[in-house]
């Protein structure tokens, strides 16, 4: 079956530091890949996505590139801010294992990011 | 456009009771999915509905059920509650023409 593995947290950085959160996946088909962010007490917000190999998703200074050869989708940001403190989830959807539906997301365990001023 | 709304936001129930949670998707969205989030198991897919039909189901016991109405609103029901059912239940909607999902704030269920 499908699975997502992301780096264990927590990650603590100083403001303006460089961020990388690693994510690798296992899928039998051709999945779409996502990063979601969850702020305290809230639901998940879609941060970025990529739907095919070599696609780069980007949003709010965050980027991730779909690497089929290494089955990876690492999240990066050049300069983090205190407001980026949250839990980040890597996820995939693969219609080939979901009865034709693209809406079954498989999530990683999440990585807690804390940014200190 | 209003986002996904879930009611109630917080709920406390006793073991053995049943509970119904409600989700109103973004206007025009036809797909509604439900997820359970716990510290131990993380985020797990429960089921997905599209045009009132269950299209996909996760690995949860039959005590967990759901339905979708003609206006795309969805409910999920958990019968014979167990302590382990304590979790944040998240609903997500999608227009059905792309695979992006938009999540609601969740319902925090505590079973005592």
Image: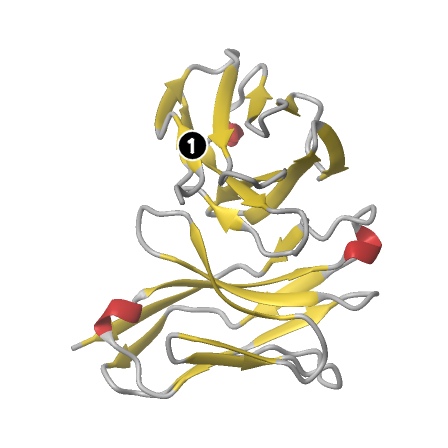
The residue lying at 25 percent from left, 77 percent from top is A81
Crowd tier of the residue under label 1, counting other residues whose Cα lies within 10 Å: few below 14, some 14–19, many 20 or above: many
Q: Quadrant of the C terminus of chain A?
A: bottom left
- The colour scheme of the drawn protein is secondary structure
Q: Which residue is mark 1?
A: B6
A104 over A84 or under it: above or below: above
Task: Let me know if residue A44 appears in the view.
Answer: yes
The residue lying at 76 percent from left, 48 percent from top is A101
A76 over B111 or under it: above or below: below
Residue A59 drawn at (x, y percent): 44, 74
Which element is circle 1 on? strand
The quadrant where residue A113 appears: bottom left
The residue lying at 68 percent from left, 83 percent from top is A67
Give the side of residue B90 with respect to residue A107, left or right. Answer: left
Q: Quadrant of the N terminus of chain A?
A: bottom right
Residue B32 drawn at (x, y percent): 60, 38
Residue A29 drawn at (x, y percent): 82, 65
Give the side of residue A97 with respect to residue A4, left or right. Answer: right
Numbered marks: total? 1
Spot the residue most to the top: B17
Q: Nearer the viewer, residue B70 or A61?
A: B70
Residue B85 drawn at (x, y percent): 52, 29
Spot the residue most to the left: A117
The quadrant where residue A60 appears: bottom left
A68 over B33 or under it: above or below: below
The quadrant where residue B33 appears: top right
The residue lying at 30 percent from left, 80 percent from top is A80
Give the side of residue B66 with respect to residue A6, left or right. Answer: right
Q: Chain of mark 1?
A: B
Task: Let me know if residue A75 appears in the view.
Answer: no
């Amino acid at each position: 079956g499908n699975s997502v593995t992301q780096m264990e947290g927590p990650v603590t950085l100083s403001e303006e530091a460089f961020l990388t959160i690693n994510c690798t996946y296992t899928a039998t088909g051709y999945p779409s890949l996502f990063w979601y962010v969850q702020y305290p007490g809230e639901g998940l917000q879609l941060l970025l996505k990529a739907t095919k190999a070599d696609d780069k998703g980007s949003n709010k200074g965050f980027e991730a590139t779909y690497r089929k050869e290494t089955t990876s989708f690492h999240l990066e940001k050049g300069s983090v801010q205190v407001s980026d403190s949250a839990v980040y989830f890597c996820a995939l959807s693969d219609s080939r294992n979901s009865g034709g539906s693209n809406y079954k997301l498989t999530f990683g365990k999440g990585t807690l990011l804390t940014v200190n001023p | 456009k209003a986002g996904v709304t879930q009611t109630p936001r917080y709920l406390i129930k006793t073991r053995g009771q049943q509970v119904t949670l409600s989700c109103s998707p973004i206007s025009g969205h036809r797909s509604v999915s439900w997820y359970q989030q716990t510290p131990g198991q993380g985020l797990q897919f429960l089921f997905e509905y599209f045009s009132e039909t269950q299209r996909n189901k996760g690995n949860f016991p039959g005590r967990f059920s759901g339905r979708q109405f003609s206006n795309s609103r969805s409910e999920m029901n958990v019968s014979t509650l167990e302590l382990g059912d304590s979790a944040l239940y998240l609903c997500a909607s999608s227009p059905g023409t792309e695979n992006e999902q938009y999540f609601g704030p969740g319902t925090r269920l505590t079973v005592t």
